[in-house]
Image: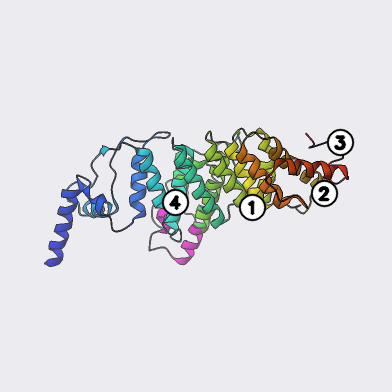
Amino acid sequence: MLRNLASLALVSLALGLGSCRALKNFDLIELADAKVHNLEALHPHEGRHAYVAGLVGDIEYLLRRGVKRTRVGRADPDQGAVPVPENECLANLVALARFDPADERVAALQVLWSCRVATECPWALSRERAVRELGAAALRIGVGPPVGLAPEATLDDAQTVGRALAKVMAALGDGEDVLDDGSLTLAEACEGVRSLMFDVAGGRRVLFGLGQLLSDPRRTPTEDDALRTLLGEVEVRCIGQTLAQALGDEAPRVRAAAVEASVRSGGPGVLAIILGQLDRESSDEVLAAALRLVAAEGLPLREEGIDPTDYARAREVWLSQLVRYAVEHPAGSVRVQAMLALAVVADSGPDSLRAEDWEDWWFARSAVGEGAPAGEGLGW
């Protein structure tokens, strides 16, 4: 009897207080699904925020989900004005990122929403944070270098992606094969998903579906392993594509975050590519971020298969580039970062933050035939 009364009290509370969204002020728990609900409400359309949305707190979300399951009253939250949806978006994204990614479904939601915010959100601060979260995920699961889609790639549409996921469900006994072309093993169905050509938006659909399937307690260990492996592969593709896209973002702060995430994930080879493209970068913020990476990681080492002479020539170009930034760049932040990087990578260089010291070091080095030939100055 007391249990029934308690249930009725919770329902009454959800219906009474939930309508005015007062429960958000009393959250004592954290639910990943509540953050996802709010992010979905804030992003009904690509490229813009919603200024009217049904946002919920964690306890309110939990109570409304219970109300929905019991079919008592309304389960949907009331729509209300959201004066600054950018702040709400960033707050919910940060809160979602705090959850333990050991839960595969939660990890899939984290990657899914970081990818979506990084590629669709109109606010640069949220895109930057999403890229940084993807950088951490990339290190955790071993993404490697960012890889974008080829311009001529033909993408599979939403229906094709949906059919491939339906085949996985059918192989798990959760549904019928929508194509009705005979039964497939789980391995065959997973291979069908792997063969899809999808962009970040299509990959997000796959992540959501696989995450839901993995959260089903009826899964056997063998099924779990197959789904977990496939989920990880899709996460790698989505993160790699998103980081590649973020390297060309219009906002310097997002590009800077993408440079850091890409180098941390992809290693020295990515740093070498980025150093080769820095002269085309117009933002001091991005330049400083790349130079911080050189100070932290050093210049790329020679990899197996690279001719020593070619590597020595490339290293000399990188040193010349660093000295040029240290001596001539108009932004103080770039000059300082260049000198800090030189202090790490330049043999017998001055431990100095004076541009004149590094210019003298370069000319003296060239005069004795070390590195660039004498008379070429900084090699520009």
Residue found at x 65% / y 40%: 335
Q: Could you tell me the amino acid type at mark 4?
A: Gln
Q: Which of marks 3 and 1 is nearer the N terminus?
A: 1
Residue located beneath label 4 in the image = 110
Quadrant in the rendering for residue 158: top left
Q: Distance between the residues labelled 4 and 3?
A: 55 Å
Task: Characterize the local packing of mark 2: few (<14), some (14-19) or many (20 or more) Cα atoms within 10 angstroms.
Answer: few
> Regarding mark 4 in the picture, which secondary structure is present there?
helix
The disc, 2 or 3, on the residue closer to the chain's N-terminal end is 2
**Disc 1 residue type (three-letter):** Ala
Q: Is residue 268 visible?
A: yes
Crowding at dot 1, Cα within 10 Å, few <14 / some 14-19 / many 20+, comes out as: few
Report the residue marked by disc 2.
307
Q: Residues within 10 Å of mark 3 (few under 14, many from 20)?
A: few
- Position of the C terminus, as image quadrant, is top right
**In whole angstroms, how far apart are the C-alphas of marks 1 and 4?**
28 Å
Instruction: State the residue in front, 311 or 285.
Output: 285
Give the residue at mark 3.
Answer: 375
| Inter-mark Cα distance, 3 to 1 | 31 Å
Residue range corresponding to the magenta coloring: 208-228
Residue 299 visible within the image = no
Displayed quadrant of residue 217: bottom left
- Name the N-terminal-most of marks 1 and 2: 1
Q: Is residue 159 magenta?
A: no
State which mark lies toward you, 2 or 3. 3
| Cα distance in 3D space between marks 1 and 2 | 25 Å
SS class, disc 3: loop
Q: Report, in whole angstroms, how far the alpha carbon at label 2 lies from the one at label 4.
A: 42 Å
In the image: residue 325, left or right of residue 152: right
Choose the circle earlier in sequence order: 1 or 4.
4
> In the image, residue 292 lies at what x, y percent?
62, 47
Which secondary structure class fits the magenta region best? helix
